[in-house]
Structure formats: structure tokens, C-alpha cells
Amino acid sequence: MDVKGVLGSISFDGEWITITKTPVGPKPAPVRIRAVDVTGTRFKAGTRLMHGYVQFVLPGSIPAGEKGGVLQAGRPPYTDPHSLSIPRKSNEAAQKLVAAVEQARS
């Protein structure tokens, strides 16, 4: 199951979540998270005017808050390794991915 994001993608194979971001600077390594380690998910659907996001919350970490401003308003910063911005056309795939992760958590 794959979701194409704004600057990267998220894939889920039933056990592992892999967040791969398109590099802005040095090439970052993909972030792999076991679904059973996730304590919560945050999903905000994209609209015609603003991108949404998918974010995974891990134990002992505080989820990155939504930024303000014109270009990144309403979503976590690009540097947050556990989230990815998504365009409106990826809303349905992102909802399915979040539902699959929630099911795998329990």
C-alpha cells in the first residue's frame, strides 16, 4: 500500500511503515517504523487550497505541531521524520493507509 506525498511517499506492507522523503539537501535515509510501535496517527485531508498530512506518533515523542505561514500552514515541518504532506488527490489512499496501520496496531 503506497501513498504519494508532496515531497516523498509512504508505504505500508502490513508490518512496517516506510516514509521516504525527496531530498532537499543531503539524501535522507528512509524512516522505517513498525506498526505495533505506533501509539497514534494523525491525518488531515488535503483541500484545493492546502496540502494535508499523515503523521505517526511514537512512544516517548511529542508530535510535531502544525506550522503557520503561507506556504506550510496547517502541516508539520518537512524536517519531521514521522510525517509527510499529501496533496488532495492522495486523500483516499492516505485514509486507507491510516486505517490499515490502525488495524495492524491492535
Image: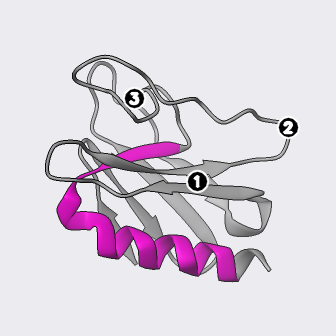
Q: CA distance from mark 3 to mark 2?
A: 20 Å
Q: Residue at (53%, 36%) from the top-left corner?
A: 81
| Residue matched to label 2 | 60
Q: Amino acid at mark 3?
A: Tyr
Asked if the residues shown at circle 3 and circle 2 are in contact, with their CB atoms under 8 angstroms apart, the answer is: no
Q: CA distance from mark 2 to mark 1?
A: 17 Å
The outermost residue toward the right is: 60
Which portion, as a residue range, is magenta? 83-103
Percent x, y of residue 56: 61, 52
Percent x, y of residue 105: 75, 74
Q: Residue at (41%, 36%) from the top-left corner?
A: 75
Q: In the drawing, what numbered circle is on residue 32?
A: 1
Q: Amino acid at mark 2?
A: Gly
| Residue matched to label 3 | 78
Q: Earlier in the sequence, mark 3 or mark 2?
A: 2
Asked if the residues shown at circle 3 and circle 1 are in contact, with their CB atoms under 8 angstroms apart, the answer is: no
Helix, strand, or loop for circle 3? loop
Q: CA distance from mark 3 to mark 1?
A: 17 Å
Q: Main secondary structure of the magenta part?
A: helix
